[in-house]
Amino acid sequence: MVWELIFKNIKMRYIFLVLVLLGVMPDLFAFDFPVKSFTLPNGLKVIVCEKNTSPMVQMEVWYRVGSKDEWDGVRGMAHMFEHMMFRGSKKYSGEGDVYIHEMEKLGAQINAYTTFDRTVYWQELPKENIEKVFSMEADRMENLILDQKVLDTEREVVGEELRLGENNWYNRMSSDRYKHLYPKGHPYQVDVIGNLDEITKFTTKQCQDFYDKYYSPNNAYLVIVGDVKAEQMFEFAKTYFGGIKKQLPLNSKKTEPDLFSFTPTVDEMTIDYPIQIYSYIVPAPAVGTADYYAFNLLRDLLFSNSNSILNNSIVEKGNLAYAIQSVSDDPRIYNNIATFDVIMQAQMGNAKVKKMIAKEIYDIINEGIDQELIDNYVKNLETNQTFQNFSNQAIADKLGLAEYYFMDYKKYNQALETYKSIKAEQLTDICKKYFNPENMKVINIKPMME
């Protein structure tokens, strides 16, 4: 495995050097493959990238539903549906995870994920089997089997997932902390995996109502990347998805409480692990807001990046902490909470770490940030995106995220373009607004006393 990673790294460096010598680097972050779209009368949009570099195809179905759409009594429903959607449908029924078994017969890799905002089902497979996937995805959008047996099975699977998470001290701490981070009524008030006491009480009617409400063609879109022709994909979509009638009434965004005026309901916690954590709690702007990209850039430069300012001064050079763990960096429709965990040995004198962090932040507020740091970050980001453009899945992810958060897949490269335009003065303003030590909340997480 080590040699494999080394070889891969050398190979990537070689490719990058060749590209530089050819003089084509400036435009490589925008992939050079045709992308076309078509929307069915029932509202389902189909986005196709004709990338003919391998005989494989990535197909993804993006649903505009996540834990933000749940209500009291069904917390955890969106995540549980991620599991239930593999169990079988009217046309493709049987025992166990029918969809996984059927897709594997087609030579596919298959999986799914749920976030606060979205649920995405994906598979990558040989292009000659893509039509079968259209048939399967359409049938589980319209005719999912939701009986008591399926519910009982998947409820137990999710329950076991929750219990396994509690076996890891950091996951357990994160779950315990999450309950204190958001005010009542916020769309992200409850973590994605939900509440076990509610999950164990789900009824088949609740599941059917959730499915009928959110798993509709006008609340979803397809992203297809690979050696295919867009026109043929559009025809498959018409054939298999075109007859699905159910529709979701389009709702406006929910009202969200102000996170700047909210204080976490605890300032201290204990854990059954022999370390100490200063957990920095910072309001983070939603996608599409004026501060979004500048906040993300400063977040990485300060905390998240392996070469970040605080990682260098506190972890690498100062040896005052084991690591800085950043959480909540996924894009969100609503303003949200970002957490930054400074993980240290539990010992006297750790308070100086908070003083060092405050000093680094005040230095940015008072003296600004070096533009070279920004430029280097953007160059590294550009290089990483260049390598990602060899991957069907990475391209599908870019197109899918742009369509989800901007309602326009053509904005897939907007993030990098915006980062390249950000100047140091903007980050100083962002630092004052979001990271000012006078306003920043910190939860002190300590080991239990024996």
Image (cartoon, grey):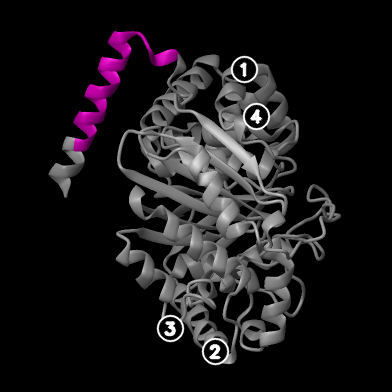
Query: Rounded to the nearest whole Å, what is the CA distance between mark 3 and mark 4?
Result: 50 Å
Residue furthest left as drawn: 3
User: Could you tell me the amino acid type at mark 4?
Assistant: Ala
**Distance CA(mark 3)–CA(mark 2):** 16 Å
For marks 2 and 1, the one nearer the N-term is 2
- Near-viewer residue (164 or 118): 118
The residue shown at (41%, 85%) is 95
For the question of whether residue 126 can be seen, the reply is no
Please tell me the numbered disc located at residue 41.
none
Query: In what element is the residue under mark 2?
Result: helix
Q: In this view, does 30 lie to the left or right of 366?
A: left
Crowd around label 3: few <14 · some 14–19 · many ≥20 (10 Å): few
Q: In this view, does 28 lie above or below 337?
A: above
x, y percent for residue 206: 71, 81
Amino acid type at circle 2 is: Asp
Q: Quick one: label 3 or label 4, which is nearer the N terminus? A: 3
Question: Percent position (x, y) of residue 254?
Answer: 83, 56
The CA distance from mark 4 to mark 2 is: 45 Å
What are the residue bounds of the magenta stretch? 8-26
Q: Mark 3 points at which residue?
A: 94
Which percent across, then down, holds residue 148? 59, 91
Is 110 on the left or on the right of 415, as rendered?
A: left
Q: Mark 2 points at which residue?
A: 152
- Residue 197 drawn in magenta: no
Amino acid at circle 1: Ser
Q: Distance between the residues labelled 3 and 1?
A: 54 Å
- Rendered image: mark on residue 294: 4
In the image, what residue occupies the spot 58% across and 75% down? Answer: 144
**Residue type indicated by callout 3:** Gly
